[in-house]
Image (cartoon, helix red, strand yellow):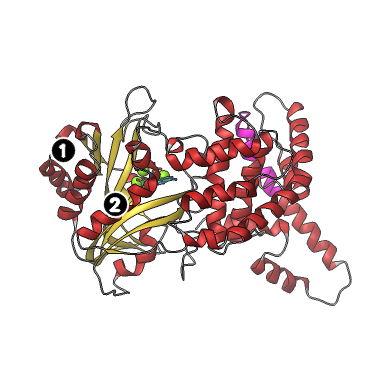
């Protein structure tokens, strides 16, 4: 059975044989791209090659790209622990053509790799095309996919965009049917969000550029951008529908079971999954220079860490544990990503400090949350003031409180939370204005808004970034 490391190599070697330059993953913090919080797909480092702004000395490339989807247009944070196929950090395998080959080569490449090299049975595969894309439909027919397995989709699922601006285009996707013992339906059906039919590969026909004012223009060149989740194809080739059953995740979940002393089976399994997933995203983000902070990228990192720490707490651990999992991760992924090994001691130290610090308020915060719920009617949302107190006094990011409540079938009154935040801010302004200091308070707040220097400003800054 091939390991994830083997599958990554097979993919890159296949495209190297087809004349593609094998390139390194780019960092998780996009260079020179303020529109994007984290690298969320393989095409990010090639954005300017598609628009023609940048010329390289090759027209075909292939990568295994580190991706984080925990904010912005593609946000899978809330899926982790609930689906078998989503992570906050994952590797996207991709092949790219910059004005070189287009649909009639990209589709046969993908088909040959998965059916011949990987040997996936054809009768388990389905494809989708954008509803108006007759050309892609015909090419799929030509490579041998029966017509009733080529599904036309009219939604944005088959029109790929990195974010609100940038190169984009219609796409075709490949799905695998894991069988009727798993809940879910084919793409386009009401049950498509289940884990039975899993999307493994997305092939984008880059031919448009989207601008801030909402307009879209056709690009001069037609290009290809593809993305296949390594963990999804890995699960499939290792005989499972579940990414968390792959060799890599099994090793991380085993390590989590070891340090927490809790079996990885049954009801506890979900906590180990979240811990394993969040261990990867937080470690890789730190290896790429993001540090925990109260605003921007650093606040997203801190939020992911704290979510993991709450799940460790639910497993009953008393002492910090996240840092003790880093060696298992380095063992699994350090060879493919040397930056992880280089940053190992810094990652361990930072995780330990953060967990030690959060533990001081985590227990009391969760106790407060439980007490608040006792007083609520069935299904009633948690009042915004309580969520704000958890945020302000106990360091609970709003989404951590939401995550905790979701398990209990409740939500947070987010309007009330925003109101409590605004009130706190107004009070702080008034206190400052009344302090008699010879400083224009509006100037101070402009600076604070720009730099995000305090805890409560952190939430706002994050919200603003989350929208891009
Ligand atoms: P889904 O519909 O399952 O959420 P997607 O359409 O959002 O996936 P794309 O943006 O098309 O995903 O990304 C390309 C490929 O990357 C997907 O086909 C999938 O194999 C993989 N992928 C996407 N999101 C994740 C994730 N959160 N975790 C693991 N793999 C992912
Ligand atoms: Mg998605
Ligand atoms: Mg999809
Ligand atoms: Mg897709």
Q: Main secondary structure of the magenta part?
A: helix
The residue carrying mark 1 is: 145
Image quarter for ligand 2: top left
Secondary structure under the numbered disc 2 in the rendered image: helix
Q: How far, Cα to Cα, is label 2 from label 1?
A: 22 Å
**Which portion, as a residue range, is magenta?**
402-419
Q: Nearer the viewer, residue 115 or 450?
A: 115
Give the quarter of the figure containing the N terminus.
top left
In magenta segment, residue 61: no
Res 412 seen here: no
Residue in the picture at 29% in, 52% down: 11
Badge 2: residue crowd in 10 Å (few <14, some 14–19, many ≥20): many
Q: Is 38 on the left-hand or right-hand side of 199?
A: right
x and y percent of residue 153 in the render?
27, 41
Residue shown at 80% from the left, 57% from the top: 427
x then y, percent, for residue 291: 62, 61
Above or below 336: residue 439: below
Q: Residue under circle 2?
A: 11
């Amino acid at each position: 059975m091939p390991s994830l490391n083997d599958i990554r190599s097979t993919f890159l070697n296949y495209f190297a044989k087809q004349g593609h330059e094998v390139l390194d993953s780019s960092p998780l913090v996009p260079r020179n791209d303020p529109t994007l919080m984290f690298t969320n797909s393989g095409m990010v480092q090639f954005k300017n090659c598609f628009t023609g702004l940048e010329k390289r000395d090759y027209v075909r490339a292939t990568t295994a790209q580190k991706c984080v989807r925990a904010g912005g247009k593609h946000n899978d944070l809330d899926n982790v622990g609930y689906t078998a196929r989503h992570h906050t950090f994952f590797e996207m395998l991709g092949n790219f053509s910059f004005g070189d080959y287009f649909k009639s080569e990209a589709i046969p490449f993908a088909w040959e790799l998965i059916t011949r090299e990987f040997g996936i049975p054809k009768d388990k595969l389905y494809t989708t095309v954008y509803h108006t894309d007759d050309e892609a439909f015909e090419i799929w027919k030509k490579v041998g996919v029966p017509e009733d397995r080529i599904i036309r989709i009219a939604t944005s699922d088959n029109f790929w965009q990195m974010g609100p601006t940038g190169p984009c285009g219609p796409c075709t996707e490949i799905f695998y049917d894991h069988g009727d013992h798993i809940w879910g339906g084919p793409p386009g059906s009401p049950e498509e969000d289940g884990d039975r039919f899993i999307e493994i590969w997305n092939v984008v026909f880059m031919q448009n550029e989207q601008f801030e004012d909402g307009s879209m223009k056709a690009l001069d060149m037609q290009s290809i951008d593809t993305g296949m989740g390594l963990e999804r194809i890995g699960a499939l080739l290792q005989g499972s529908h579940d990414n968390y059953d792959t060799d890599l995740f099994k090793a991380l979940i085993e390590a989590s079971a070891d340090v927490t002393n809790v079996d990885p089976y049954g009801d506890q399994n979900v906590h180990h999954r979240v811990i394993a997933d969040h261990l990867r995203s937080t470690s890789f983000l730190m290896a790429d220079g993001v540090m925990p902070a109260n605003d921007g990228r650093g606040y997203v990192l801190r939020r992911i860490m704290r979510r993991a720490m709450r799940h460790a707490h639910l497993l009953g651990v008393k002492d910090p544990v996240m840092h003790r999992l880093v060696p298992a991760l380095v063992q699994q992924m350090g060879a493919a990503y040397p930056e992880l090994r280089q940053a190992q001691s810094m990652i361990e130290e930072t995780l330990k400090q953060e967990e030690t610090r959060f533990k001081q308020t985590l227990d009391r915060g969760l106790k407060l949350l439980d007490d608040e719920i006792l007083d609520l009617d069935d299904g009633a949302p948690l009042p915004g003031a309580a969520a704000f107190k958890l945020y302000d006094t106990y360091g609970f990011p709003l989404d951590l409180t939401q995550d905790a409540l979701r398990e209990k079938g409740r939500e947070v009154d987010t309007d009330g939370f925003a109101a409590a935040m605004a009130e706190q801010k107004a009070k702080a302004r008034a206190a400052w204005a009344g302090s008699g200091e010879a400083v224009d308070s509006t100037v101070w707040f402009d600076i604070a808004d720009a730099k995000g220097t305090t805890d409560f400003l952190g939430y706002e800054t994050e919200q603003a970034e989350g929208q891009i």
